[in-house]
Amino acid sequence: MNRFVLPLAGFLLMVGLLGYGLSLDPKKVPSPLIDKQAPAFSLAMLEEPARQLSTADMVGQVWVLNVWASWCVSCRAEHQVISELASRRLVPVVGLNYKDDPADATRWLQQFGNPYATSVIDRDGRVGIDWGVYGVPETFVIGADGLIKYKHIGPVSQESLEQKIMPVLKELLG
Amino acid sequence: MIPEIGQFALIVALCVGLVQALVPLAGSSLGIQRWVAVAVPAALAQLLFVGISYACLTFAFLSHDFSVLYVAKNSNTELPLIYRISGVWGSHEGSLLLWALVLALWSGAVAVFTPSVPRVMRARVLAVLGLVSCGFLLFIIATSNPFERLLPAAVEGTDLNPLLQDIGLALHPPMLYLGYVGFSVAFAFAIAALISGQVDSAWARWARPWTNIAWLFLTLGIALGSWWAYYELGWGGWWFWDPVENASFMPWLIGTALMHSLAITEKRGTFKAWTALLAIFAFALSLLGTFLVRSGVLTSVHAFASDPSRGVFILGFLVVVVGGSLALYAWRAPLLKSAASTRLLSRDGMLLLNNAFLTVVTAAILLGTLYPIAIDAMGGKISVGPPYFNLMFISITAPLGVLIGIGMLIRWKQDSLQRLTSRLRIPALAVLLVSLGLTLALPQWQWGAYLGIAMALWISVTAAMALYERFRHRALMSALRSTPAGFYGMLLGHLGIAVFIIGITLTSLYTSEKDLRMAPGDTYTVAGYEFTFHGVRDFNVANYVATRGGFSVRSVDGGYRTEMFPEKRVYRVQNNPMTEAAIDAGIARDLFIALGEPLDNQGAWAVRIYYKPFIRWIWLGAIIMSIGGLVAASDRRYRRLVRSRSPAREAAEQPS
């Protein structure tokens, strides 16, 4: 055993990690939260920081939680699709403004348009941790029973909206 | 028909690649000269066939052949000519084909431009490049065929992603690839040297110009990407620590370390094993970058074409190439003995420290990039953001700035602390005082600004001292003649860093920004400039509709006037809105206007205005650095060697 073997050992360790990462396939493997109770939160609203929105307020209806941030470039890519989802008025789309400066977030909504019923402020990302937020953007579908029914990681494309999210929503809405 | 020719040419290229990889390798270890001689023509044939394949795909784009799935997905009859050419690499399949083409170009260049390298060595280098090329061609043919047919053909294409319809981003991938793939040459040299057991000064001299050129392309590629993010994303930001940005930055940092460590190996015959390891790492990180972008392991803005089965292939390829190289390294490196020992207080020592800092900062970036996966593997969840990267990067690289200055003036082998302090005391004091004055002249005092300015001045002053030292005892003409181009390249590279430091420091600390509601006729003042809004008009341009705002701008003292026209565009086919900021660029400041949303029916708009001091210096610094790389690569001694190598020595290097 000599010290020249160390780079190889380190590399193999990394490959193991990457192989594991590949098996995760963030876009397809369901989150461990699926069919679990949505983690509770009660957070200030971006538009009216004096008011709070809590998960309890949403019980009894199907809703969508979209995690976004003004610093998140992919959020711009999905913005059009999220807007389209909101404009169908099937379910309320709540934004979770993740690790963001509220001033930046407000500007972002002004610049690109605000599709959200409301956005809540998760400034330090604590609620994001409860929800298992891995990167931004992420989108959750929550049933009327308060269980998480679907989780989408990464920007929602038109295709994933139609083929993944809409079927879940249709089933939930009966 | 043409697409089929393209695909056929790819398959032929793969076969030629196998020959290029296996025959010379076998020939060099068995001592069969005829087999060794296969390497050069095989590399050129490979270039020919990959070139034909690439030309076929380009032709499909130019002729709107929507029976090719890839063209139908990434083009449109209204797409302007230039983006039909750049559309070839606008998505996954084509960008891999570009990768293969760039690799073939590099191999061809090695085949043609290395007459000074012994034949066996060159054959081995080309064989390693051939192996890498086989991996990529196999990948394209097996998982990502750009020539797949769409039957019946689409009537109209779905257009190129509007984000990519931009000159900065059109040029970004080829530059980046020239850099990424360019490190494969240094890598191939390292592997060839490890096979022969000969990592010496001559080897370092062969590898250096190739490393410099790959590095300069990578520098330009990263700078282009950052410039694009600045003007196209509408945030005025220029670096986001996105995993894919990190993936291009890590090979750059290791490539920088490699350039410096090659300098020691050439000059002093030390750090041989380390230099070979860095060459392996630089290319390994380029491959890792491909893996991260193409596999979808990390979600990011760039992961527009990710697919897990491709991820498995690239991971397997990574294991074969990097794992194989590191195994070879583990086996052969113990044989490499340094020609001399190294003292810390010497140029060797400074370069070693430079390597240590660059490697540590790369490891920290790698950690931050892969950490989310690692934590997930342990059952947790976390995301790593810009605060970690900024703090870590600045605190690790700040000492490097000081080192650059000392490194340019310290002597090789051994220096005395007394000599150094007596020479550097007064310049250091002067730098601290002048920086104090300059920082006080800024709008407000910031310690960060003081440090940044002092660092940039320190590098510039020591570079000037190094130049003066070279010319002091010699007549001008003889000094000019005897100073190698590599020296000027080094000075330029370091001056580029100084310019870059000024850019990031002043931009991040003194940017002013205002978000305004502006109705036609409104005037606002931002950072000494009056902005007057004249309302918006709609334009119908090529494949998009633009809403264009008109602004007139004058400086408060009245000395400067201009007009600016920010746009919002909607690309017709994909119906994507894009913000096209208006930028009035200047050497000391940029004015930047981005149009938000209309706020009412009276023509008022949300408008974002930035004043960004010295932001151009960031990219100017990168350009100066790459010119430095070019100058250094043009050094005469890389060519002079051709004549001074004796045939006897070459014979001695034949395989034992």
Image: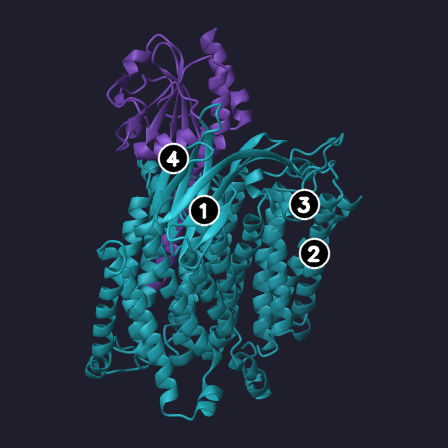
- Residue mark closest to the camera, 1 vs 4: 1
Q: Is residue A121 visible to us here?
A: yes
Mark 1 or mark 4: name the one nearer the start of the chain: 4
Assess whether mark 1 and mark 3 are in contact (beta carbons under 8 angstroms). no
Per the model, the C-alpha gap separating discs 3 and 1 is 36 Å
Assess whether mark 2 and mark 1 are in contact (beta carbons under 8 angstroms). no
Q: Is residue B323 visible to us here?
A: no
Q: Are marks 1 and 2 on the same chain?
A: yes
Neighbor class of circle 4 (other Cα within 10 Å; few <14, some 14-19, many 20+) is some
Per the model, the C-alpha gap separating discs 3 and 2 is 18 Å
Q: Identify the disc placed on residue B51.
A: 2
Query: Compared to B348, does B601 lie above or below?
Result: above
Q: Amino acid at mark 4?
A: Leu
Chain rendered cyan: B
Q: Amino acid at mark 2?
A: Gly
Quick one: SS at disc 2?
A: helix
Task: Name the residue carrying label 3.
Answer: B84
Mark 1 or mark 2: name the one nearer the start of the chain: 2
Q: Identify the disc placed on residue B553.
A: 1
Task: Name the residue carrying label 4.
Answer: B516
Which quarter of the rendered picture does the C terminus of chain B lie within?
bottom right
- Residue mark closest to the camera, 3 vs 1: 1
Residue A152 position within the rendered picture, expressed as x and y whole percent measured from the top left = 44, 26
